[in-house]
Amino acid sequence: MKRLLFILMMMTGTLAMQAGDYPYLTFETTDGNKVSVSTESLTLTVSGTTLTAGNQSFTLVNLSRMYFSTSDESTTGISETVTADLNEVTDIYDLKGNKVSKSQMQKGVYIVKTNKGTFKMTVK
């Protein structure tokens, strides 16, 4: 029994040391969304089927995984477009799937492919 208790204490200490290197605890839901919570003074509470981490609450059945991370991985679906990325455009499509050139772009939403990835772009 003492041996089991010692092993559990060692595992807890190891986990605490590893978690100390990561400033965020990231929760991924079954629909793919990610929410990161700062680990500084983090309190986790389970009440019924709800997990509360800091100021965020999650229904347990909707969580697919949680892990420590070095950056805020919260997904908003919005990212900043850098001008350098626009210079590397390989293809542009309108929302109907028609290929267009930069000169044909008017107000609207476009799918833009670059060497670094594919993203949506709004022209105002």
Image (tube, grey):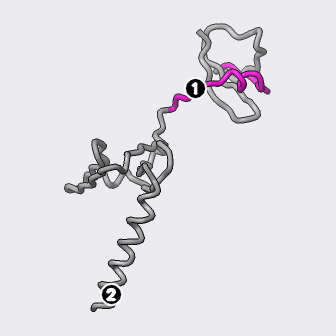
Q: Residue placed at 48% from the left, 45% from the top?
A: 32
Please name the residue that numbered disc 2 is placed on.
4
Image marks 2 and 1: residues in contact by CB distance under 8 Å: no
Q: Quadrant of residue 99?
A: top right
Q: Amino acid at mark 1?
A: Glu
Residue nearest the viewer, comparing 96 with 8:
8
Q: Residues within 10 Å of mark 1 (few under 14, many from 20)?
A: few
Q: Is residue 2 magenta?
A: no
Quadrant including the N terminus: bottom left
Q: Residues within 10 Å of mark 2 (few under 14, many from 20)?
A: few
Q: How many marks?
A: 2
Q: Amino acid at mark 2?
A: Leu
Q: Which residues are magenta?
A: 77-94
Q: Residue placed at 76% from the left, 16% from the top?
A: 100
Q: Which label was assigned to residue 80?
A: 1
Q: Residue placed at 25% from the left, 51% from the top?
A: 50
Q: In this rendering, would 115 be left or right of 26?
A: right
